[in-house]
Amino acid sequence: MPTRFTRFFTLFAAALCATVHLQAGAGPMNDADAEKVRGVIVAQIAAFADDDAETAFQTATPEVRAAIGSSGRFLAMVRGAYPMVYRPASVSFHKPDADEGSVLQLVEITDGNAKSWLALFALEQQPDSSWRISGCLVAENHWQSV
């Protein structure tokens, strides 16, 4: 199966699983919480722009940080696997979908080569009520308007 179809089906399956998981009580967030969620993602992207590994690493959940091990390793992983997130030319946020401490935030990203991407960020609310990123799936956006 060609790579782009594999990536599409991986993203689609993950989004479907996440949607089914959230669907029971899922709904739109209030504006204040949606802004906090966007703020975490914007802070991570800004930290990447500054090559600030420690700040970017702190936007991830404690579980993600423990699994990756260090801020330097995290920055290297994002730089290599997610260059469109590491250095986006522009980002556009859709409305987040929330359910009891979990959020899915779809972000349209344009990279430096004007290529369009869809990034699905998963975030979890922490005991202190802050939000942290628990994962991100990215696929090329083939549905952009012409």
Image (cartoon, rainbow, N blue to C red):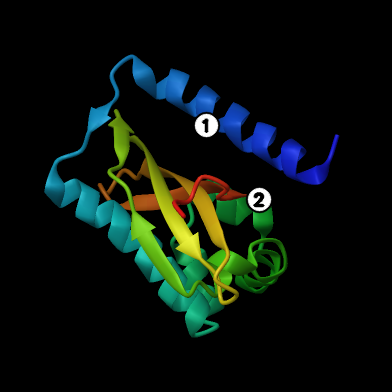
Say which amino acid is labelled 2. Answer: Ala
Residue for point 31% across, 43% down: 127
Q: Is residue 16 above or below residue 37?
A: above
Q: Which mark is residue 15?
A: 1
**Residue that mark 2 sits on:** 67
Left or right of residue 3: residue 7: left
Q: Secondary structure at mark 1?
A: helix
Q: Secondary structure at mark 2?
A: helix
Q: In which quadrant of the rendered view does residue 76 lie?
A: bottom right
Marks 1 and 2 close (CB-CB < 8 Å): no
> Where residue 110 sits: x, y (%)?
50, 66
Residue for point 30% across, 33% down: 98
> Where residue 85 sits: x, y (%)?
54, 65
Residue for point 69% across, 68% down: 73
> Where residue 43 sits: x, y (%)?
37, 69
Locate the N terminus and report the quarter of the image it occupies.
top right
Q: Residue furthest bottom?
A: 50
> Where residue 106 sits: x, y (%)?
41, 46
Query: Distance from label 1 to label 2 (Cα)?
Result: 22 Å
Residue for point 30% across, 52% down: 37
